[in-house]
Amino acid sequence: MKVTISRIVKIHTENTFVEFSTPYGKGLSSLFTLEARENCSYDIEINIDDDFYWGKNIFTSMSNAPSIRHEAEETYITAELTSITEDGCGSLKLGNSIILILIKNENKDLILPSLIEISAIQITLYPTNT
């Protein structure tokens, strides 16, 4: 996925905390590179380390379009949930990108594919063309 670094929030010794923008909106994450620059674009892979629980931080979306937004330290992503394995690995499709998440409980009423919204805190962007 192509993202642009909107602003650098904090620089740490191992990674940088940034606000990023995409065609779907803006989010907050760690960026696993020390060379991050504001207003520069990167091809990235998104990694989300949160555990997701239906009704707590993963919901069926009321929206009909993918999006990314953030409030305080949480980033909200609306994307298409295309599959869930028996061990809870879920695949989200956001544009042409696939994001893997771990879903800890079952939603028996869900029909796949389905548009869902997650709220995540532990997001890391990994540049793929460096």
Image: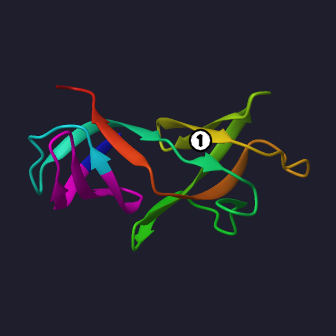
User: Quadrant location of the C terminus?
Assistant: top left
Residue at 18 percent of width and 59 percent of height = 10
73 in the magenta segment: no
Q: Is residue 42 left or right of residue 62?
A: left
Q: Quadrant of residue 93?
A: top right
Question: Callout 1 environment at 10 Å: few (<14), some (14 to 19), or many (20+)?
Answer: many
What main secondary structure does the magenta stretch of the protein show? strand
Q: What span is in magenta?
A: 4-29
Query: Where residue 1 sits in the image (x, y, percent)?
Result: 35, 39
Query: Where residue 96 sits in the image (x, y, percent)?
Result: 47, 37
Q: Quadrant of residue 28?
A: bottom left
Question: Exactly how many numbered labels are in the figure?
Answer: 1
Residue at 12 percent of width and 56 percent of height = 39
In the image, residue 25 above or below residue 30: below
Residue at 20 percent of width and 54 percent of height = 5
Residue type (three-letter) at the residue carrying disc 1: Leu
In this view, the residue farthest toward the right is 108
Query: Where residue 20 sits in the image (x, y, percent)?
Result: 28, 57
Query: Where residue 26 sits in the image (x, y, percent)?
Result: 35, 63
6 in the magenta segment: yes
Q: Which residue is mark 1?
A: 92
